Image (cartoon, rainbow, N blue to C red):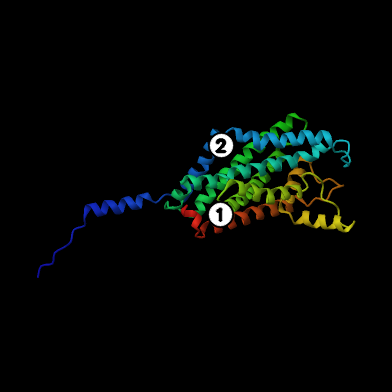
Amino acid sequence: MVRSIATPDPEMSELHDSRRAVVASPWDAAGMICWREIVRFLRQRNRVIGAVGQPILFWLLFGAGMHSTFQIPNQSFGTYFFPGTLLLILLFTAIFATISVIEDRNAGFLQGVLVAPIPRWSMILGKVLGGTLLALLQGGLFLALGAFLGIRYSLSSAVGIVGLSFLISWSFTSLGLMLAWRMESTQGFHAIMNLFLMPMWLLSGAFFPVPLAGGSISQTLMHVVMRLNPATYGLAGIRQLMQGGPVASLWQPSLTICWIVTALFAVLLFSLTTYIARQPSTHDAR
C-alpha cells in the first residue's frame, strides 16, 4: 500500500512566515511611540510657551509681589518659589503630553496601535517615556535659566534634581494618561486635570510652606493633608538639593524618604495606568 506524502503549500508557508515577521519587539514599539511624541513636540513648538512661559511669568510676578511679605529667615520668596515653579512646569507638560491620547483616538491612530501585535504596556511605556523626556527638556531649560538669575546649585545637586524631576514627570504623565484613557473630549480632560493636578501642586509646599503641626485645628489638618500628598516629597527633595540641605524653619522630610516616596508613587501610577489600558472598553473602537 502506497501512501501519498502531502507536500507543504509554498504560498501557505510564505503567509505563515509573513505573519511571524509582523510581530514587533515591544521595546522597539515603545521607542517608536516615544520618538513620535518628541517629533510631535518639535513640530508644535508653541507648546514650550505654554508649558514654560506661564510658570516663569508666575515666578517673576509672585517673586516681586510677595518679596516683602514672605517670612522665612535668609530666604527670599523668589528662591523659595523656584522649585515650585519647576514642579509647575513638569505638571503643565504632563497635561500637554497626555492630551494627545484623545486626539489620537479621534484621528484613528490609537485604534491602529491597539490592534498591532504588541502588548499594551509597550504602548503605555512609549507614551509615558515620551512625555517624561519632554518634561525633563523643558524643566532643564528652566534650571539653566535659573543659573543665570542667581539660583546656585552644584553639579551633583543638578544630577539629583534631574533624577527627581524624572520620577515626578513620570508620575504626572502616568496620571494624565490614566485620566485621558477613558476621556472623549479635551475640555473634560482639562477640567479633570485641573481638579487633580492643581490642588496637588498647591498642597505640595510649592507656593507656601507645609505648616508645622501642633497649632490650630486648621493648621494641623493642612499639615496632615500636605504630608499625604506624594508631590510634597518630590518637591522637598528638589528644594533640599538646591539649598544644600533642609531648612531649619520648615518641615521637610529626609532626602532618602523623598526618593523612596517619589519612586514608589511613579511605579504605582504607571502600574495603574497599564492595568486600566489593558481593560476592554468601547472607547478603544471609536
The image quarter in which residue 70 lies: top right
Residue in the image at 53% along x and 41% along y: 37
Q: Are marks 1 and 2 in contact (CB under 8 Å)?
A: no
Q: Residue 49, percent across and down? A: 65, 33
Residue in the image at 76% along x and 36% along y: 59
Q: Is residue 134 above or below residue 253?
A: above
- Residue 152 in sight: no
Q: CA distance from mark 1 to mark 2?
A: 23 Å
Is 120 situated left or right of 154 in this image? Answer: left
Q: Residues within 10 Å of mark 2 (few under 14, many from 20)?
A: some
The amino acid type of the residue labelled 1 equals Arg
Q: Residues within 10 Å of mark 1 (few under 14, many from 20)?
A: some
Q: In the rendering, which numbered label is found on residue 182? A: 1
Please identify the residue farthest to the left as the structure is shown.
1
The amino acid type of the residue labelled 2 equals Phe
Residue in the image at 82% along x and 33% along y: 64
Pick the front one: 75 or 284 = 284
Circle 2 residue: 41
Q: Residue 98, percent across and down? A: 58, 46
For mark 2, give the secondary structure.
helix
